[in-house]
Image (cartoon, rainbow, N blue to C red):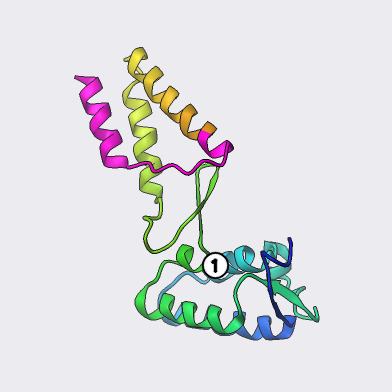
Amino acid sequence: MTNSQFPNLISGEELWLWRNAAIAGAIAHNIEAREVDWLLREIAGLDSLVLRLELYKEQPKIEMSLSLKDLDVLWQRRLHERLPVQYIAGIANWRQFQLQVTPAVLIPRQETELLIDLALAATDNHKSLRMVIGLIWELVVELFRLDLLIFFIMPQFMQLILVLKH
C-alpha cells in the first residue's frame, strides 16, 4: 500500500473507538455489523483476523484512504440514508473483479450474478448460444485484465439472449 492510496493517518485507538461506535450504530439501524469490517478492510487495508482480534488497537498509525471525519460522515449517511457501503469504499466486488463505483454507477448485485448463471444454464441444450455467451464472458474478463473500462448493461444482454434463443 502506498501513501497515495492511504494518505490519512489515524491511531489504532481512534479507529478502535470509531469501529465500536459504528458497529453499535449498525446494530441499532438493522444493518449488518460485518459491513463495518468490510469497509475497514477496504479503506484501511486491515485483514479480517486483525479486525476480529483487535490487533490494530495498539498501532500508533494506521493509513486509510479516507479521513476519520469523512469516514464518519459517510457512515452516518449509511445509517440514516441507507447509502450503500460500496459507495463509501468506492469499490464493489463482483465475480472475480473489483469494480470502482460511485453513486453514478449501479452496484452489481448477487441477482446479477444469478442472471448470468441462469442464462448459462438455459443454454445447456443450445451449444451455439452457450458458445456466444461464453465468448462474451471471455471478452469481459480480458477487457478487465487489460484494465479497460467497460460498461455492461444487463437488460440489453438479456434481450440479446432472448433474441438469440428464438
Q: Percent position (x, y) of residue 137?
A: 45, 30
Question: Quick check: 89 left or right of 3?
Answer: left
In this rendering, the answer to whether 100 lies above or below 15 is above
Residue that extends furthest to the left in the rendered view of this protein: 166
**Residue drawn at x 35%, y 13% as measured from the top left:** 128
Residue range highlighted in magenta? 143-166
**Callout 1: SS:** helix
**Residue drawn at x 48%, y 44% as measured from the top left:** 149
Q: Percent position (x, y) of residue 59?
A: 80, 78
**Residue drawn at x 45%, y 82% as measured from the top left:** 76
The C terminus lies in quadrant: top left
Q: Main secondary structure of the magenta part?
A: helix
Residue type of the residue flagged with mark 1: Arg
Q: Percent position (x, y) of residue 27?
A: 47, 78
Q: Percent position (x, y) of residue 124?
A: 36, 19
For disc 1, the marked residue is 34
Question: Toward which corner of the image does residue 115 lie, by quadrant?
Answer: top left
- Specify whether residue 145 is painted magenta: yes
Q: Residues within 10 Å of mark 1 (few under 14, many from 20)?
A: few
Question: Quick check: 111 left or right of 69?
Answer: left
Q: Nearer the viewer, residue 10 or 104?
A: 104
* Number of numbered discs: 1
In this rendering, the answer to whether 148 lies above or below 122 is below
The N terminus lies in quadrant: bottom right
Question: Toward which corner of the image does residue 11 lie, by quadrant?
Answer: bottom right
Question: Quick check: 120 left or right of 24?
Answer: left
In this rendering, the answer to whether 128 lies above or below 140 is above
